[in-house]
Amino acid sequence: MRAPLTRLIAGAVAFVSLGIGVGVTSASATQHPSINYLKLSMATAYAPRAAHGTDDYHCSLINPHVSSDSYIVSSLFLPGDNGKTEVHHAILFMIPPSWAAAATKANNGGKGWTCFGETVLSGAQVGIPGGGKPTGQPTWLTGWAPGDNLHTTPQGTGVLFPKGSLVVMQIHYNMLVSRKAIKSSLTLGTVPVSPSIKPLSLDLFPAPPDVPCLAKWHPASTPLCSRAASLKNLALRFGKSAVNFVNILETACGRSASSPPAGDTTSCTWRYFHAADIVEIGAHMHLTGSSMRVVLNPGTSGQKVLLNDTNFNFDNQISYKMSSPVHVVPGDKVQVTCTYNPIVHDINPQLRDAPHRFVTWGDGSSDEMCLALISTIN
């Protein structure tokens, strides 16, 4: 993951679990004989909880006992909530061996830990006595959002899964839906490393939402319709780092961090710093998201629309594979534009009981995101 803000936002979407069991099964006779299936399942159900707000991000550490390098070519995630979207979304992180001690300590004897924010392990958790941090960093292995239960990588590609890796499952629970204890599972399809499989890289391109309340709501009657009050509430729910990230993102997109332009549409343009071939794009927003457009080199003679999702549906989030790879070189630009429909707040069962707020980037189901996930091969 090499986009300019990748390290900052790699954990902005999330995964949870408590007491996870691991099992490996061979491929069936009707499937490719080289595929092995690694099943990661929760040993016990987990009931979400939060001191403030209605969102819980919970992490647990798993040792999958991976004895050789492999590639992940498919993932099947079963959220365990009977389709009620209590599980908002999820990410599986690879933990390099150099981080194993810190991750094991954070795991709290198998009970897991709360992991809001941009990373699954905080700076305090990974600090080395005497100063410094371990080499490497956690990277995404795979992710899940409603509608994308079974995901396969583009043909001939896979996500590298090094031997000796540990895994963190980070799940975002949406308590606007339910607070019941549920049990989720994930199955990874893996193949041995070979020259015929090309490794996938993931670049994350965000834009900062700044969506004001509808006209019938105003700060005098609804305090959180003030952007300042909404950001203060964001800090209460997820910590000051959540507000720091909003400010960093606004600045990176050329806006005033204290007074950015507000509206139902947001956009940001990023620059590529490496050559690659784009093979897949995923769109991620929250419950009021209505459309996303991703354009390569906008406003030039070489402009190319990579994605134009005009009917974004949170409950049916899918990744779009390119009909043929799109080559990018250093200096190429990617523009991400998202549009939201604030009216959804009043009619969506998951939102209508939540207070109206000025909506910014945030980890909660009642906050918003605008994130293009672009998979490439070198």
Image (cartoon, rainbow, N blue to C red):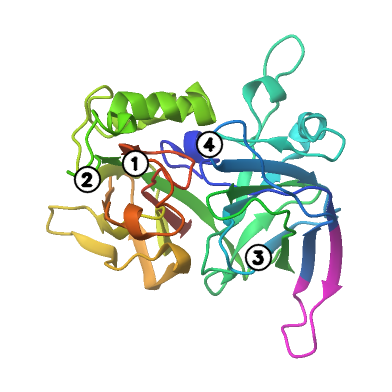
Which residue does the numbered mark 1 point to in the structure image? 356
Q: Farthest residue toward the bottom?
A: 30
Image disc number at residue 53:
4
Q: Secondary structure at mark 2?
A: loop
- Lower position in the chain sequence, tag 2 or tag 1: 2
N-terminal label among 4 and 3: 4
Assess whether residue 161 is covered by the magenta stretch: no
Tag 4 or tag 2, which sits nearer the N-term? 4
Residue 92 in percent (x, y) is at: 65, 51
What separation in Å lies between label 2 and label 3 (alpha carbons)?
Answer: 36 Å
Give the vertical position of 235 relative to 49 (above or below).
above
Query: Between 200 and 17, which is closer to the camera in this rendering?
Result: 17
Mark 4 vs mark 3: in front: 4
The residue under label 1 is which amino acid type? His
Q: What type is the residue that disc 3 sits on?
A: Phe
What residue did someone put label 3 on?
77
The 10 Å Cα crowd at callout 2, few under 14, some 14 to 19, many 20 or more, is some
Q: Which residue is mark 2?
A: 214
Q: Sequence order check: which comes first, mark 2 or mark 3?
A: 3
